[in-house]
Image (cartoon, rainbow, N blue to C red):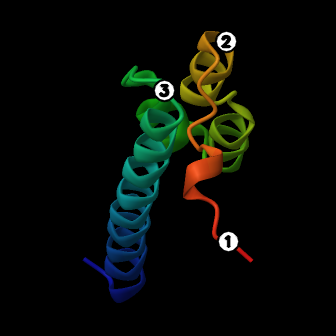
Amino acid sequence: MESWLWGWFIGIIVVLIIQYFIAREFQRIAELKGHYEKRYFWITFFLWIVGMLLVIALPDLKNRELLQTGHSGSSDDSLPEI
């Protein structure tokens, strides 16, 4: 094979590896927001920037649930005294 073809091949492999780690991290972010579907990994992996923006725009279901039940996650007892 010619050298430029090897360069393209290695470049594509490197981009796919980097995109895998980015997609995995954005799936973790989606799980922190309360979305446990595997589709957020694949959306971010294949759609790159659009998938990342989609995960960023997801609502935080965990905080929404806490607010609906009346638990804010913090209390006045945890605030420092002045």
Q: Position of residue 64 (x, y in %)?
A: 66, 21
Kindly identify the amino acid type of the residue bearing the numbered disc 2: Gln
* SS under mark 2: helix
Task: Say whether disc 2 or disc 1 marks the residue closer to the N-terminus.
Answer: 2
Q: Give how far across and how far down residue 75 sits, in percent.
A: 60, 43
Of the 4 image quadrants, the one containing the N terminus is bottom left
Foreground: 7 or 42? 42
Query: Whole-percent x and y of residue 39?
Result: 44, 23
Task: Residue at 38%, 82% (x, y): give it.
Answer: 7
Rendered residue at 56%/56% (across/down): 78
Label 1 element class: loop
Q: Which residue is mark 1?
A: 81
Q: Residues within 10 Å of mark 3 (few under 14, many from 20)?
A: some
Q: Give the total of numbered labels.
A: 3
Q: Residue at x 44, y 49 (%)?
A: 23
Instruction: Name the quadrant containing residue 82.
Output: bottom right
Q: Which mark is residue 68?
A: 2
Q: Amino acid at mark 1?
A: Glu
Q: Position of residue 79 (x, y in %)?
A: 64, 61
Q: CA distance from mark 3 to mark 1?
A: 33 Å
Residue under circle 3?
A: 34
Mark 2 or 1: in front is 1
Q: Are marks 3 and 1 in contact (CB under 8 Å)?
A: no
Q: Amino acid at mark 3?
A: Gly
**Which element type, helix, strand or loop, lies under badge 3?**
loop
Q: Please name which of the two marks, 3 or 1, marks the residue nearer to the observer.
A: 1
Pointer 1 local density, CA inside 10 Å: few below 14, some 14–19, many at least 20: few
